[in-house]
Image (cartoon, rainbow, N blue to C red):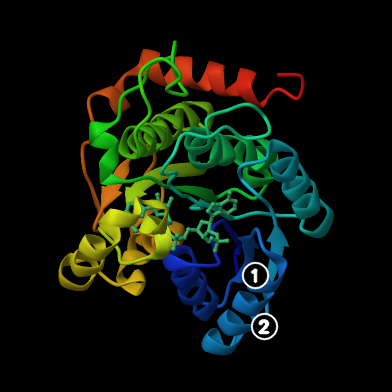
């Protein structure tokens, strides 16, 4: 039985992954940001999986204080973490900044992953063989990385520009983590879940909603199907020892050229460390 923490477990593919992994008999820690909703999801996952070792912790990935509290709460209650699934993600129609002063998409989708992962890394290493799963997107192929304007203050904000940058950051972080985990028997892999009919695009402009409704029903896969690459990377013996890769449909795929750039990955790591420093 593995201890598996899943962020963004209250909706979409994170929720469905929680059900599948609970059915496999693991101890699941579902992370949500709303207490009532998260408690409801835990009850549902327990009922659907027949596994009562499903619990929850709360954390808002747009707040570094909250992510630190989440990591502290995890440490207080658990002594091992075999699989960390970084999945919570969102989009913002308008540019906004978090209470930490960072553009909200980058803060939530990238720095949230980065901070939680680095805060829990020692427990993951202690639990080896262990795995870290990073939910990115095929959108990362279109992502850009401008370290002089990470938050689109100068360059002009766009919902997709911000989202694809954050998802590129997910793949770059995977690469940097792989290097740091060498010899530690902890793997880290990124993935695209497919185009999945979930709530994520509720944050897109209102005028796109009718179009999205049609696209969802005609072309998108279900959240159950979307969860498959997560659960595959989390527990399948087929990927044992495989690390630093980017997967689509349970197959490794070469990520974007920029996502393979060592110097960019290292620069992002250093900048992320600076941005999550408590005094930053
Ligand atoms: N759907 C797709 O087509 C697609 C494609 C490529 C990649 N992805 C990636 O898949 C992941 C999951 O997305 P999804 O499609 O399943 O979307 P979803 O149904 O909207 O689920 C997103 C999850 O993230 C949580 N979340 C969002 N902002 C948060 C915050 N500030 N703090 C804590 N939790 C937060 C949500 O919590 P609430 O329940 O409280 O809202 C929810 O549990 C994301 O990383 C996304 O980028 C999705």
Residue 69 left/right relative to 211:
right
**Residue 40 percent location from the top left of the image:** 64, 79
> Is residue 20 in sight in this rendering?
yes
Q: Quadrant of residue 32?
A: bottom right
**Residue 56 percent location from the top left of the image:** 69, 66
In the displayed structure, 177 sits above or below 209; it is above
| Residue at horizontal 39 percent and vertical 41 percent from the top | 243
**Residue 84 percent location from the top left of the image:** 56, 52
| Residue at horizontal 53 percent and vertical 27 percent from the top | 180
Pointer 2 residue: 52
SS at circle 2: loop
Residue 222 left/right relative to 90:
left
Structural distance between the alpha carbons of marks 1 and 2: 15 Å
- Report the disc number at residue 38: 1
Respond yes or no on whether mark 1 lies under 8 Å from ligand 1: yes
> Is residue 194 in sight in this rendering?
no
Q: Is disc 1 surrounded by few (<14), some (14 to 19) or many (20+) residues within 10 Å?
A: many
Picture quarter with the N terminus: bottom right
Picture quarter with the C terminus: top right
In the displayed structure, 34 sits above or below 115; it is below
Q: Residue extending furthest right?
A: 76
| Residue at horizontal 46 percent and vertical 75 percent from the top | 20
């Amino acid at each position: 039985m593995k201890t598996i923490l899943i962020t963004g477990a209250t909706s979409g593919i994170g929720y469905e992954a929680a059900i599948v992994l609970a059915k496999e008999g693991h101890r699941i820690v579902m992370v949500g940001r709303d207490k009532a909703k998260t408690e409801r999801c835990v009850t549902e996952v327990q009922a659907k999986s027949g596994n009562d070792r499903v619990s929850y912790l709360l954390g808002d990935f747009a707040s570094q204080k909250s992510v630190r509290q989440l990591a502290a709460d995890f440490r207080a209650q658990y002594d091992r973490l075999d699989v960390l699934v970084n999945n919570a993600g969102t989009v913002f129609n308008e540019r906004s900044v978090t209470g930490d002063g960072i553009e909200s998409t980058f803060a939530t989708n990238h720095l949230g992953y980065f901070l939680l992962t680095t805060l829990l890394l020692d427990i993951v290493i202690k639990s080896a063989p262990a795995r870290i799963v990073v939910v990115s997107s095929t959108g990362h192929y279109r992502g850009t990385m401008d370290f002089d304007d990470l938050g689109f203050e100068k360059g002009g904000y766009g919902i997709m520009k911000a989202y694809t940058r954050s998802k590129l950051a997910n793949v770059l972080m995977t690469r940097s983590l792989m290097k740091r985990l060498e010899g530690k028997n902890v793997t880290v892999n990124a993935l695209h879940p497919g185009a999945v009919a979930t709530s994520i695009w509720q944050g897109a402009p209102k005028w796109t909603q009718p179009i999205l409704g049609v696209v969802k029903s005609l072309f998108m896969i279900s959240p159950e199907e979307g969860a498959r690459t997560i659960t595959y990377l989390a527990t399948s013996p087929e990927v044992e020892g495989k690390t630093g890769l980017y997967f689509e449909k349970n197959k490794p795929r070469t990520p974007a050229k920029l996502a393979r750039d060592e110097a960019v990955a290292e620069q992002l790591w250093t900048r992320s460390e600076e941005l999550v420093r408590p005094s930053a």
